[in-house]
Amino acid sequence: MFVILVYDVNTKRVNKVLKKARKYLNWVQNSVLEGEISEANYRKLKMELQNVINEEEDSCLFYTFRTTKYSQRESLGIKKGGDDMII
C-alpha cells in the first residue's frame, strides 16, 4: 500500500516522530512523509508513533492508497526531501 503521513506534534516530540517515521517512509516536506509500506510495517509504524505522541496535544494523519495508478503530485516552490517516491 502507499501511505502519506502528515503530523502536527509538539516541538519536543518532532524529532522522535520523524525518526520513527523515516524507518518506514520517505521524508518529502516538513511534517510529511510518503512511501510504499507493507500492512505489517504500517501497523508497526502506527504503534511506534502512538508510543511517542501525546494524544491530547499531537496528531498524525494517515492517507492510505491501494494503488497510485490514478494519482498525481504537483509541486510549487522549493523542493524539500526526496523525489524517489513520487505519487
Image: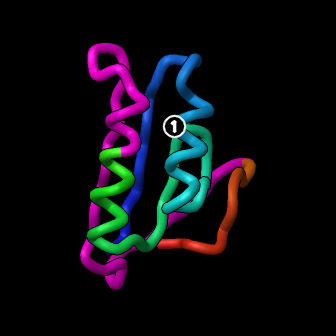
- Element carrying mark 1: helix
Magenta range is 48-77
Q: Nearer the viewer, residue 51 or 25?
A: 51
Residue 16 against residue 44 in the figure, above or below: above
Residue 79 x/y as whole percent = 72, 54
**Which residue appears at 31% of the width and 46% of the height?**
47
Q: Is residue 31 left or right of residue 65?
A: right
The amino acid type of the residue labelled 1 equals: Val
Could you tell me which quadrant the N terminus lies in? bottom left
Residue 4 x/y as whole percent = 40, 56
- Quarter assignment of residue 66: bottom left
Q: Residue furthest bottom?
A: 69
**Which residue appears at 34% of the width and 29% of the height?**
59
| Mark 1 lies on residue | 17
Residue 72 against residue 53 in the figure, above or below: below
**Which residue appears at 29% of the width and 68% of the height?**
40
Q: Is residue 13 left or right of residue 53?
A: right
